[in-house]
Image (tube, helix red, strand yellow):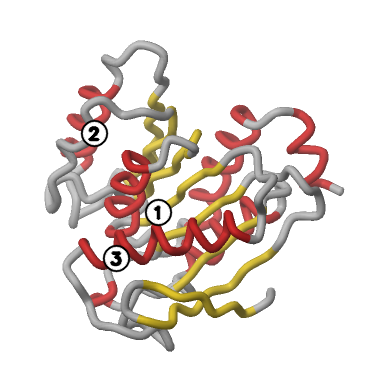
Amino acid sequence: MPEVIFTGEKGRLEGRYQPAKTRHAPIAIILHPHPQFGGTMNNPVVYNLYYQFVNRGFSTLRFNFRGVGRSQGSFDHGQGELADAAAALDWAQSINPDARACWIAGFSFGAWIGMQLLMRRPEVEGFISIAAPANLYDFSFLAPCPSSGLFVHGDKDAVVPFSAVTGLVEKLKTQKGIIIEQQTVADANHFFDGKTEDLMEVIGGYLDRRLPETAKKTGAA
C-alpha cells in the first residue's frame, strides 16, 4: 500500500495509492468523514471501502483532507476539502492518463464532498455515498444528478435520520437515464460500529452488478 504525497491548494496532501495492473483501469477516489470529528483516511469504513475498489482492479486513492495527519492546511468547512478532492482526482488522472472512467466513494462528510465533485467532473460515472448527511448539509446542488450510484445508510443512524436520505434519494430517482439505488444495513449506527462487514457486503454486491465482467476478472486476478 504505497504512501503518496501530492500537491493540493494549501500544500502537501498525504494519501495511500494502489495502482491497477491494467493500463485502462478505472480510477476510484475515497473520501473520509469529518476532519473535526476524528475522520481520517484510516477510518475502518474508508479503509475497507478502499479495498473494495482495489480488489476489483481500480487504481485507488484515499487521502487525508487538509489539516488531517500530515496533510497541510486547516479545515475549511467543505470548500477547501472539495478543492482537495479535485486535486486528488487530478493527481490520479495525471498518472493514469489512459483511465477509462472514474468513481467517487465517500463516507458521511466525505459523501457530501464526493457528490459535489461528481457535479463538477463529467468523467465520474459512478458513486457510493455512505451515511450521506442529508440533514446537516445542502444537497440541492444535485439537480440533476449526472451519474448513477448507491446510497447506503444504517437503519439505526441517530446522527442522520434514515428519512432524510430517503427524501433525497426519492428526488434523485425522478431523473431519466439515471439509476439511484438505496440500501440499508440493519442495526447499523452512523459509524457502522460492528457492522463494517455487512456494509462491505452491500457495497461489493452493488459494484459487482455495475461493473463489466472484465473489471471483475481483473480484480480477481
Q: Nearer the viewer, residue 205 or 146?
A: 146
Q: Is residue 66 left or right of residue 27?
A: left
In this view, the mark in front (1 or 2)? 2
Indicate left or right for 85 with 156 as reference.
right
Residue 142 disc label: 2
Crowding at mark 3 (Cα within 10 Å: few <14, some 14-19, many 20+): many
Q: Quadrant of the N terminus?
A: bottom right
Q: Quadrant of residue 69?
A: bottom left
Instruction: Tell me the mark number nearer the camera, choosing from 1 and 3.
Output: 3
Q: Is residue 25 above or below residue 148?
A: below
Query: Residue, x 53% and y 74% (percent of image)?
Result: 15
Q: Position of residue 118 (x, y in %)?
A: 37, 42
- Residue 113: image location, x then y, percent: 30, 54
Name the residue carrying label 1: 106
**What type is the residue that disc 3 sits on?**
Glu
The CA span between labels 3 and 2 is: 18 Å
Other residues around mark 1 within 10 Å, as few (<14) / some (14–19) / many (≥20): many
Q: Earlier in the sequence, mark 1 or mark 2?
A: 1
Q: Earlier in the sequence, mark 1 or mark 3?
A: 3
Q: Residue at (36%, 52%) from the top-left corner?
A: 188
